[in-house]
Amino acid sequence: MKYVLVTGGVVSGLGKGVTASSIGVLLKACGLRVTTIKIDPYLNTDAGTMSPFEHGEVFVLDDGGEVDLDLGNYERFLDIKLTRDNNITTGKIYQSVLNKERRGDYLGKTVQVVPHITDEIQDWIERVAMNPVDGKEGPPDVCVIELGGTIGDIESMPFIEALGQFSYRVGPGNFCLVHVSLVPVLNVVGEQKTKPTQHSVRGLRGLGLQPDILACRSTEPLEENVKAKLSQFCHVPISSIVNLHDVTNIWHIPLLLRDQRAHEAILKVLDLQHVGKPKLAEWTERASKFDKLKATVKIAMVGKYTGLSDSYLSVLKALLHASVAMERKLVVEWVPSFDLEDSAVKETPEAHKRAWKLLKGADGILVPGGFGDRGVEGKILAAKYARENNVPYLGICLGMQIAVIDFARSIMKLRGANSTEFDPDTTTPCVIFMPEGSKTHMGATMRLGSRRTYFHVTKCKSAKLYGNAGFIAERHRHRYEVNPEMVPEFEKAGLSFVGKDESGRRMEIIELPSHKFFIGAQFHPEFKSRPGKPSPLFLGLIAAASGQLDTLLQRSSHIVNMNSTPRCLNGTIVPTKALYSKGHAKKPLDSLVNGYFTNGNVIHT
């Protein structure tokens, strides 16, 4: 097993996740099998209870793991399926060590950060790195590890120490360190400054790690004299300094690395110089296709976390994948849901007027998932507007539930209809708390992970978009569901529940048959969207918003859908007892710029 560690310095938000993903793409294009691990130094056990404003979206895996959004980048770029163990947190490590201490595994020993915490980190990495994530048997060839945060963070210290020990454990030729740093340009001076990177590398070396490759982020390509200076002061060959400057779309990053022969530098350090050259024709075509898009499609994103685009990162990516497939340039209009509410007329009249103008000017409306009652009435109004004006609508999770609430209030004249999440005492609970959920513990107590949805209406738009499959497997994350007792009333009034779970009592997909495109899904289709394989429901939304739905449905109905085959979860541990080549004996194991536009501005993530 070979390991590539990606660290970051100077500031956060440089794009370590995209860099790690792109390195994985490059190595995969060389014919190697690649897996990934993300290390998050925070004390939370997982990302499930964290606010999107704090840490961006919570990405959900097939096995129900609630993980950092960077694992979404890995899955999208590499087209792999990860498990919850591919996201290491300080909370998980300490929890594992403390459980062992309580069992008596360390009986007679004083449990300390070194060696017990550092050994646990190393053992975890080795164990998870051996798990296949690409659907094939046998362990991968390379594991790309991303260390969250920046060098010098207090909470990262145990991981830095563990990774330093780990580089010695696996031995020369099996470990490559890529350090991502910033080369800024001060407006006053107008020249590229190397000092921040110099200090960052000095700090890294002071902690016992020497970078093999420098990945320098900058707005413009690095000048040759700047590279020479970095090489001299950071002790890294010029050939091992790559520049990640701003590009027109994120799919150019693997191509940028290839053009600078980053793969050759990495493979040399890993003693893998016998592998083939990277084949990136599909990536080249995709990046070029995006740059040539002219016709736009405008989607109104109605939510309450609109101040931070990372809160809806997977939704934005899924929209982007679909829009490129339908040959449209995506324009996202952020609409704060609370600005649509009647109360905003008096409190924030200008914001209210602007929100409705954006909503009415959109070609399609999307209401993503969310929690809590803030802005919910605005989301209900957005669904109502889409329904009454025949505007293409896609509701995800909560977006489906609020569409049901609107239907109950507007069509069925049930004025008090609501969800018990927002009004526990409602007399018409059309959305209720799931009986198996917990009201006392928040972490990992939702209905999570990959679940099957069976189509009960074969001629519906959703079934056609999924290639007329009998069932599909999509990822879920919710505590509330449509009240099954009210389903007959809804269907009698004209709302069609076209997809249900295996029991037939849990509603998964709704449609309005008479509408151009009005679909709600209890699951999160965005989590399985890929650049080359867009989510069918997102494709449908973009197609309907751009006048191409009929053509797409005719095409989709002839596609054999792969989701109809049973899904296998990753996570089978593949044991290994061999020594590393050139390595040291080890103990047995115990166990960038995106291409969418928003309100006229490019989003940088």
Image (cartoon, rainbow, N blue to C red):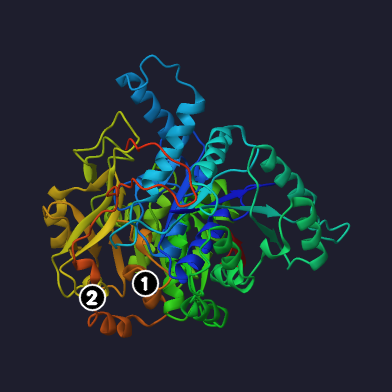
For label 1, the SS is loop
Quarter of image, res 521? bottom left
Residue 466 in sight here: yes
Please state which amino acid type lies under the numbered disc 2. Gly
Residue 370 in sight here: no
Q: Is residue 26 above or below residue 129?
A: below
Please state which amino acid type lies under the numbered disc 1. Lys
Q: Where's the C terminus, which quadrant?
A: bottom right
Q: Is residue 84 above or below residue 22?
A: above
Q: Position of residue 602 (x, y in %)?
A: 61, 66
Q: Position of residue 550 (x, y in %)?
A: 30, 83
Quarter of image, res 373? top left
Observer-nearest residue: 568 or 459? 568
Residue at image mark 2: 467
Observer-nearest residue: 336 or 201? 201
Residue at image mark 1: 533
